[in-house]
Amino acid sequence: AQSVAQPEDQVNVAEGNPLTVKCTYSVSGNPYLFWYVQYPNRGLQFLLKYITGDNLVKGSYGFEAEFNKSQTSFHLKKPSALVSDSALYFCAVKRSSASKIIFGSGTRLSIRP
Amino acid sequence: ETGVTQSPTHLIKTRGQQVTLRCSSQSGHNTVSWYQQALGQGPQFIFQYYREEENGRGNFPPRFSGLQFPNYSSELNVNALELDDSALYLCASSLGTESYNEQFFGPGTRLTVL
């Protein structure tokens, strides 16, 4: 069975500091991993994905994520946070052969000025 | 390029009623997936449609059904509404069914069941 865990309901960071939003997954076979962001009253927006290859993936708005197979993790990172990064972030996983995508419960990121 | 659109934006129904939600996929996308997002939770996969056929289904009862039309737009129908069906319903489109393709989400329809 596939599953995704986002262990932190909320992450608080000061503007300009680095941020990390954690995600661990469980899936049989090769995983496809995604990060999405959701702003209030909006649908989800795609940030980045890991399919294969380089473990460090770069995405939109300066975000990046590191795939760690041994720790089954796919943490989202940004070197310098902006107030406008404040939103709800979702990690998601798919099996390579499946149509079903499993989302984590979400982490609310709050960036203080 | 036109993004994913959904209608209506908000909807209020009573228990036992039926509801139809609509989704227009992004231009050029032939695959549509539907999700239920309850308050404070991540989206839960309902089903996916590809070329007018169901292509995968999550753990939802048969009273959740769907359609995809030749222009790739889609409908989600829910019969015999229950209070727990209150949620944000998200539609997402993608090109093809390959698992590595990212999905593009609409703004959602917020359904309230009283």
Image (tube, coloured by chain):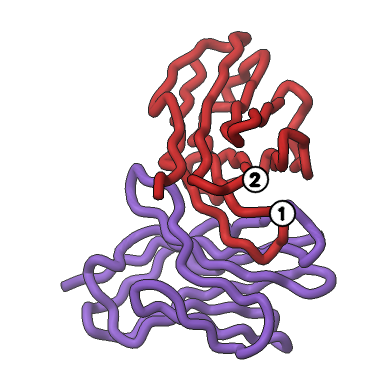
Q: Secondary structure at mark 2?
A: strand
* Residue B16 image position (x, y, % from top left): 62, 9
Q: Residues within 10 Å of mark 1 (few under 14, many from 20)?
A: some
Q: Nearer the viewer, residue A64 or B3?
A: B3
Which chain does the numbered disc 1 sit on? B
Which chain does the numbered disc 2 sit on? B
**Relative vertical location of residue B61 with respect to residue B17 in this rendering, above or below:** below
Q: Is residue B10 left or right of residue B26?
A: left
* Residue A69 image position (x, y, % from top left): 71, 85
Q: Amino acid under label 1? A: Thr
Q: Is residue A48 left or right of residue A42?
A: right
Q: Secondary structure at mark 1?
A: loop
**Disc number for residue A24:** none
Which residue corresponds to the image point at 61% horizontal and 76% vertical from the top-left? A50
Which of the two discs, 1 and 2, labels the residue nearer the N terminus?
Answer: 2
Residue wearing tag 2: B31
**Relative vertical location of residue A77 with respect to residue B20 in this rendering, above or below:** below
Q: Residue furthest left?
A: A113
Q: Give the colour chain A carries in the figure.
A: purple
Check chain identity for marks 1 and 2: say if they share one: yes
**Disc number for residue B97:** 1
Chain depicted in red: B
Q: Nearer the viewer, residue A106 or B4?
A: B4
Task: Give the Cα distance between marks 1 and 2.
Answer: 7 Å
Q: Nearer the viewer, residue A12 or A74?
A: A74
Which residue corresponds to the image point at 37% horizontal and 46% vertical from the top-left? A42
Tell me the quadrant of the picture where the N terminus of chain A can be found: bottom right
Q: Amino acid under label 2? A: Thr
Is disc 1 in contact with disc 2, using a CB cutoff of under 8 Å?
yes
